[in-house]
Amino acid sequence: MNTFSTIELQVSPKGIATIWLNRPEKNNALNAEMIAELISVFQHLKDNEAVRFLVLRGRGKHFSAGADLTWMQASAALDYAANLKDAHELGELMSLLSHLPFPTVAVVHGGAFGGAVGLTACCDMAIGTSDAVFSLSEVRIGLVPGVISPYVVQAIGERASRRYALTGERFTGERARDIGLLAATYEAIQLDDAVEQWIDLLLQNSPQAMRVCKALLQDVGSGDLSEELRQRTEKVIAGIRVSDEGQEGLSAFLQERKPAWV
């Protein structure tokens, strides 16, 4: 991969990809360059079979302050077509993150405003500090949480989405946990240890099974069962049972040993 200006990519020998939002002097605010770099790295990672899962974090005091003010000022001077292009790029970023073929974990500390709430919602799981601060603050400046809204609704539900998108009010990490945006919260001093615990948890699992499971759950969606979906689920479980990792996992369980991927 090329050297990035606004993000940092680390891939460990175990296949753990960590992306750091790396504009701490701007509180990791999103601008056109960061969006383009994130799109580039997601496109690269999605085709990398060696990646087992992704951790998304922010350098400095905050996860991300949302949209960069300088970028927003420039966007305000653009016409509708140019703004639509900008919105498409942000939509592409969120879609790529949401549909990465492996599990994704957001780690949130400090502030997470606007588009940063979208990044959190697009990840399969998110953890954060109890005192993290979230806000869908777009209405405060005459805007709306456009492209991130489907992911936010999927993460926290329609009712909570209406409340926080319409009021623009701030809420804590603990409240984010209560409404489902975060899976767990920790004191700031405990966050790095908690990240390692989540990494260890995911490393216990079959890389292939996690990918297949994620694709399956995306197909299942809200769980409305059709004959087509039923047949899909039957084919998925039959196929993975006879796969190499499926056979290894079953053998390891029956033989009371650790599977090869651990």
Image (tube, helix red, strand yellow):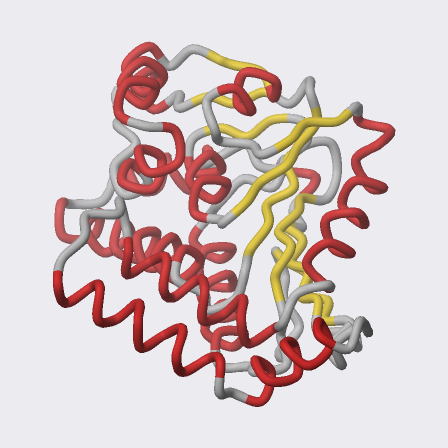
Residue at 40% x, 83% y is 239
Establish if 229 lies above or below 57: below
Please tell me which residue is depicted at 50% across the width and 40% down the height of the picture.
120
The spot of residue 12 in percent (x, y) is: 77, 71
Determine which quarter of the picture holds residue 62.
top right
Left or right side of 135 for 157: left
Quick check: 16 left or right of 143?
right
Q: Foreground residue, 107 or 252?
A: 252
Residue furthest toward the front? 254
State the residue at coordinates (39%, 29%).
156
Query: Which residue: 36% across, 64% down?
Result: 216
Q: Position of residue 83 (x, y in %)?
A: 22, 47
From the viewer's side, name the closer residue of 85 and 110: 110
Q: Hey, which quadrant is residue 97 in on the image?
A: bottom left
For residue 70, say whether it is visible: no
Which corner quadrant holds the N terminus? Answer: bottom right
Q: Quadrant of the C terminus?
A: bottom right
Residue 179 spot, x, y in % from top left: 46, 22
Q: Position of residue 177 (x, y in %)?
A: 56, 24
Tell me if 255 is positioned left or right of 128 in this view: right
Q: Is residue 203 visible?
A: yes
Q: Nearer the viewer, residue 188 or 229?
A: 229
